[in-house]
Image (tube, rainbow, N blue to C red):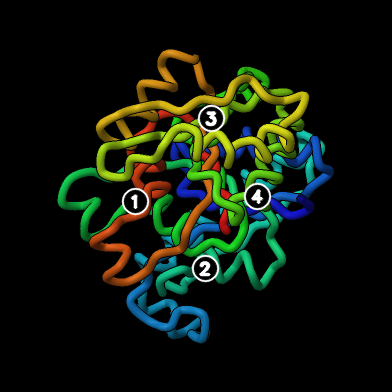
């Protein structure tokens, strides 16, 4: 984990993500990359000075963003972490993921305000979109957080073999935080599984979590999110870790992505590890 990307809109949520990213960067000796998107009506990058002067409002916004980025870089460097900034004018889908891939980013930390109702269905939150397209792990933070406070991480899974590699990353993350892992299978009426079948699948994950395992449990619930939320409340879980399937297009619209739903609706931090 040598390069950490922090998409920012300079809000309190984004600043919370920055502080978490600094802690992680210090632990791994990583550098931070700040990313901000500016919406412009024209091909701003290729305008000369005279042409850009024709758009004073855009020029003012770009200058404001660049000043904010410089402040962030100075703030981080005072903490002893190397930092860079990038202002993007690419409004295409998955622009953050494109930047991450091009610059060899290995981890993304992002604040989220969430999106609900009709806005969520058509647009989703920015955090959802980053989770959907990212090829590297993404940590979503909504409130001010001290990483030292995270002592319990919930890993929700079906515990199929394809989840092994993402879970190995979860174990590494738990070691960094000094946290224990809760292995949980959510058993719902719509996808009911025999308990002994699930327990057999969970055994290899329990071995991988040796020394960092809090408990391994099958939770019966009507709905996945309901079961997850209740478990977190009862067990004082400080973070949720999930592996992500990258569904796109109609399959994503109709089936949805559980990780994206959790990112949008849960208040505690959520970290997604792509399969």
Up the image or down, 9 lies above or below 187; here it is below
Up the image or down, 259 lies above or below 275; here it is above
| Rendered image: mark on residue 125 | 1
Q: Residue at x 50, y 38 (%)?
A: 198
Q: Position of residue 79 (x, y in %)?
A: 76, 34
The answer to whether residue 56 is left or right of residue 16 is: left
Q: Rounded to the nearest whole Å, what is the CA distance between mark 1 and mark 4?
A: 28 Å
In terms of secondary structure, where does tag 3 sit?
Answer: strand
Q: Position of residue 251 (x, y in %)?
A: 30, 67
Up the image or down, 65 lies above or below 53; here it is above
Q: Sequence-wise, which precedes: disc 3 or disc 4?
A: 3
Q: Rounded to the nearest whole Å, what is the CA distance between mark 3 and mark 4?
A: 15 Å
Residue pushed farthest left? Answer: 118
In terms of secondary structure, where does tag 4 sit?
Answer: helix
Q: Sequence-wise, which precedes: disc 1 or disc 4?
A: 1
Tell me if label 3 and label 4 are in contact, CB under 8 Å. Answer: no
| Rendered image: mark on residue 154 | 3
Q: Rounded to the nearest whole Å, what is the CA distance between mark 1 and mark 2?
A: 19 Å
| Rendered image: mark on residue 88 | 2
- Please state which of the two labelled residues, at mark 3 or mark 1, is closer to the viewer: 3
Q: Sequence-wise, which precedes: disc 2 or disc 4?
A: 2
Tell me if label 1 and label 4 are in contact, CB under 8 Å. Answer: no
Q: Which residue is mark 4?
A: 164
Front-lying residue, 236 or 200:
200
- Please state which of the two labelled residues, at mark 1 or mark 2, is closer to the viewer: 1
Query: Split into 4 quadrants, where in the image is the C terminus?
Result: bottom right
Q: Mark 2 packing: few (<14 Cα in 10 Å), some, or many (20+)? A: some
| Rendered image: mark on residue 247 | none
- Please state which of the two labelled residues, at mark 2 or mark 3, is closer to the viewer: 3
Q: Residue at x 41, y 16 (%)?
A: 233
């Amino acid at each position: 984990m040598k390069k950490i990307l922090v998409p920012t809109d300079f809000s309190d949520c984004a600043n919370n993500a920055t502080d978490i990213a600094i802690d992680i960067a210090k632990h791994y000796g990583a550098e931070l990359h700040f990313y901000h998107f500016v919406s412009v009506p024209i091909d701003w990058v290729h305008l000369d000075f005279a042409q850009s002067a024709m758009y004073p409002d855009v020029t003012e916004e770009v200058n404001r963003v660049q000043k904010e980025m410089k402040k962030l870089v100075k703030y981080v460097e005072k903490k002893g972490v190397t930092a860079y900034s990038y202002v993007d004018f690419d409004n295409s889908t998955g622009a953050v993921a494109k930047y991450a891939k091009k610059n060899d980013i290995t981890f993304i930390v992002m604040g989220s305000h969430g999106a609900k109702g009709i806005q969520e269905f058509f647009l989703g939150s920015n955090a959802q979109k980053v989770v959907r397209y990212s090829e590297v792990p993404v940590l979503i933070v909504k409130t001010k957080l001290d990483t030292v406070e995270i002592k319990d991480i919930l890993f929700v899974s079906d515990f199929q073999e394809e989840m092994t590699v993402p879970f190995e990353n979860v174990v590494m993350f738990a070691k960094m935080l000094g946290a224990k892992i809760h292995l949980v299978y959510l058993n719902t009426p719509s996808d009911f599984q025999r308990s002994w079948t699930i327990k057999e699948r969970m055994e290899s994950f329990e071995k991988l979590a040796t020394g960092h395992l809090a408990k391994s449990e099958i939770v019966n619930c009507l709905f996945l999110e309901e079961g997850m939320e209740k478990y977190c409340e009862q067990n004082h879980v400080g973070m949720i870790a999930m592996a992500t399937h990258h569904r796109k297009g109609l399959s994503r619209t109709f089936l949805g992505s559980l990780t994206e739903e959790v990112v949008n609706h849960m208040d505690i931090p959520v970290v997604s590890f792509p399969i």
